[in-house]
Amino acid sequence: MRVRQILFNLIGNALKFTTTSKEKRGVVTLTIDEIEKNDYVSNVNFKISDNGIGINEENQQNLFQPFTQAERSTTRKYGGTGLGLAISGKLSNLMGGRITLSSKLHLGSTFDVDIPFWKSQETRAMDITELDSINVKLVSFSNQDNERETRIKNHLIREGANVISVHSPIGELFEEKSDVLLIIINNLSEEKQKLTTLLHTIKQYQNIIITFTTEDMEQGRQQFNQIRLINIESLTRQLLIENIYKTKQQSLEINIDNLDLDLDLDLDLDLDLDLDQLTLLSNNTARKKQQNVKQNNNKLKSGILVVEDNPMNQKLITMQLKNIGYHCDVADNGEDGKTKWHSGSYKLIITDCHMPIMDGYEMTRNIRELEGSENRAAIPIVAVTGAAMTGDSQHCYDSGMNDFVSKPIQQSDLRAILKKWYPHE
């Protein structure tokens, strides 16, 4: 609780005194490192940096004293720093730590907070790792690990992963098999051609994660929408673990390219079925189930529009919806989806986010505008996204979507969405 209070104060100040203008993009960063440890205690450094207004050397000396503020002009414009820094300094001292400041006027500030944490007996006894024995290749196009790559590598190793750094990916990538390829992109404009060549060589994307900076994230979503993407600037330990683990599991799931989607099998088909399980169905059983589905097609609930540009995904979602009693129409892109929605009578739209001509975000915004101008009831719109854990979910909500499901889409997720958003009269 006290550490959180310190971070709230310091990050709050950094945000307060850092702005974005036409001349300069405001940036606030928090980095956390274990700087030393033994069997009983770990010394942890919290570094809060900004490129804001900065503090001159004269005022730095007294900044952690109670009721001291930097300048009257600062107080009038920003509301001052108040008691936050004094309280943070006092709390860190009481916990056996310290706060130091490095700052230059108009160039920004960096606060370093060093605090010792005593390990509990439970921690020492359990020593749990989340990614035990998962093989991760950390791929980059730089000549050596930079600070960001080193930090990610150290996090993965602490969680039990086996990590190999690869800096010449085309030549080294296939020497040893890995569970997850984590590709670090530091500058998309400079590394785009190398990334495209690498992905063309790999072809199978089930076990790939690509990290982008905030600046490159939107372009990355548009051009690499079949791959799990992460914003590296907002990457947390838990988010890293979840993405590595989910990508490992996804690589073990069924490859839909090997599935005959022209058969309308009445299967409770989730993507985590093993192909060997599917082959247990005899030809006679498959034909019988196919006949049962065709007999029941007239009983399917209607009113669902699926907007998806990939033919394989169109077939898959259509089949999954049939299996649980629903019929859908299909649109090939956002423009087609908007047209079909406008001329039809639908109860629910399920849409991919990234498509040619018009993507799912733009389609949703257009539909919401038309609903307002034509006084139509708002239709539930659910996104299908490959990056739901990386901030894409907020982008969906900001566009006017109601909900999202993650790729690869599973039948259990569809059931939950239909139960929640399909209007059952």
Image (tube, rainbow, N blue to C red):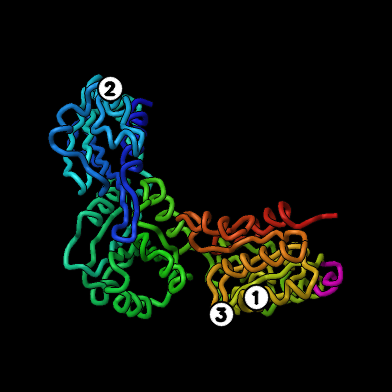
Image point 86% across, 71% down: which residue? 298
Image point 59% across, 57% down: which residue? 404
Mark 3 vs mark 1: in front: 3
Mark 1 vs mark 2: in front: 2
Is residue 357 magenta-colored? no
SS of the residue under disc 1: helix
Disc 3: which residue: 357
Image point 54% across, 78% down: which residue? 356
**Quadrant housing residue 199:** bottom left
Q: Is residue 204 visible?
A: yes
Residue 15 is left or right of residue 330, and the answer is left
Q: Amino acid at mark 3?
A: Ile
The stretch of residues the image draws in magenta is: 293-300
263 or 18, nearer to the observer: 18
257 or 64, nearer to the observer: 64
Per the model, the C-alpha gap separating discs 3 and 1 is: 21 Å
Which x, y percent locates residue 144? 17, 63
Residue 74 is left or right of residue 57, and the answer is right
Disc 1: which residue: 315
